Image: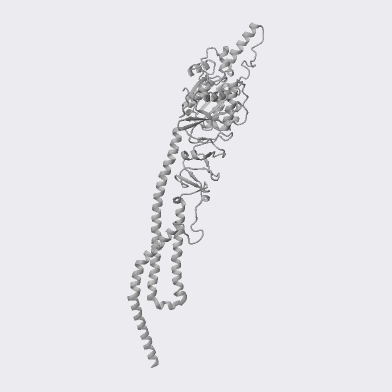
Amino acid sequence: MPVLVMVVAYLAAFILYLWGCVTVLVWIAVPACYLFGVGGPLLGAGLAVTLTGRVLAGHEDRPGSPVLVGPADTGDRGWPTYCAIQVYRDLQAADRWTVRVVYRLWTWSYERTFARYGVRTLWAWPLLLPVLVLLLAVTLGAAAGTLLTALAAALLTLLALALGLVTAGTLRAADRLWQRVFHAAASCPRPGCYHVTRLPAYRCPGCDRLHRDLRPGRLGVLWRHCACGTTLPTTVLRATRRLEPVCQRCDSPLHGDAALATDVRIPVFGAPRAGKTRFIMAGIVGLSARPGSRFAPADPESDRAYAEYEATIGGGASTAQTGKALPAAVTLRVAGGRRTALLHVFDAAGERFTERAQNEELAYLDHARGLVFVLDPFAIPEVRARLRGTAAAGGSASGGGGASGGSASGGPAGSASHDPDESYHVTVRRLRDYGVDLRRQRLAFVLSKADLLLAGPAGAGLPVAGSDAIRSWLLDAGLDNLLLAASRDFADVRYFLVSSMAADPDGEVAASAPLDWLLAAEPVPTGGAT
């Protein structure tokens, strides 16, 4: 009988438990599951969006999250634009934060049920069912919210990147177009460097740090923020006007308008004692001495060189022989309205043009669009022969003694003694070896020492002006091969007879005339004859 009573009691309790479960299931669990199934995903999605918004607003749930993308992550030490890198780090940080919050919800629920009561928790399964539904719904909603947030961020980022790319491309194209139209570049005048580039480095005025590539890009489209916080303008057109340009190769300061101003490089080559240095002195002084001239020295070194040139030419002093060290460029700034131009003239010792091994370091030769070849007329064998014949005739008539002041080979003292062809062909071979397209370059062929030549019988019949007439005289003097090579090698060759004893820019044998002719092919207002 007691056993029967016990069985009946257990059966009644079980029936009562089932009735309670059904009641809870019908009246509490099912409505709660329905409510949680609808609201849970919204709650989870809202959680993901909220946490993402907090990350984007600068909040973080733990130190160091998200990882800040700074200047150390880039080539130049500058802060990258948000859409370039940081947006991806922020989204990763927001995703990790969302996962941690959802994980804490699951662990909190577990700790208050199974961790505390064990399997006895299963007796309350009707009450656990809504909790499980809520957790699953929140998890799915958080995942969906994270996905939607990522998609929205990706769409906005792509739009921003597309706009940035179009803007950056347009600004870069404007730089490139300006430089192509106006032949602008940045030339380093330092001996041994001579680097030429369309993109100089720029020095930050706040910390002196160099920015090697200040074009619009991931570090900024319109502006860049240096690691020190200084705001820098992008594009060469804007940066050159506000910042100090620096050579990319040797880190030496460049001229203030480098890569923005028209850049003209004119190397002068020829044999030793051909008159190159004197020609450069007279030519540069002549350009600056012209009434209303817009030529002026562009830097302190060039200013000192110009003062020396002016004193030498104006005082009629003799010219010291050029040293064998690598030359620095003498640079003139040419003002022309709102634009400027830089004229770089290079003068190396003639010994460097007589042997191939001597001109390896003259990298400035490779970047010129026009060159000047200086020929001493007294180095021409035919001219020397005429002088020797005249001297012999004069000595015979006077009873002895040759022409005073002459050289043993028949020319005046200080005349070039090297073969006229040698320095030309050595230099041309060097240019070809370095891949220079000579058919895109112009050559001013200068016959120097016109004052001495015209004063003696060797210059009889030599016209003082006219390229064709001077060329004909050189042909008669036996330089057929040299002139043929020059016309074959270069796109355009013009012949000049030059006297470098004075700086008269308007004289018939002005040393500035070859420079004027070369400058006429550049977008530079020179005011000279073309």
From the viewer's side, name the closer residue of 93 and 56: 56
Q: How many marks?
A: 0
Q: Is residue 508 left or right of residue 15?
A: right
In the rendered image, the quadrant that contains the N terminus is bottom left
Classify residue 92 by image quadrant. bottom left
From the viewer's side, name the closer residue of 176 and 401: 176
Q: Is residue 247 left or right of residue 399?
A: left
Residue 465 seen from this side: yes
Residue 95 position in % (x across, y down): 44, 60
Residue 135 position in % (x across, y down): 40, 68
Classify residue 281 by image quadrant. top right
Residue 177 position in % (x across, y down): 43, 36
Q: Is residue 9 left or right of residue 445?
A: left
Residue 401 position in % (x across, y down): 66, 10
Taking the view exactly as shown, the residue that stands out farthest to the front is 292
From the viewer's side, name the closer residue of 180 and 338: 338
Q: Is residue 421 above or below residue 158?
A: above
Residue 489 seen from this side: no
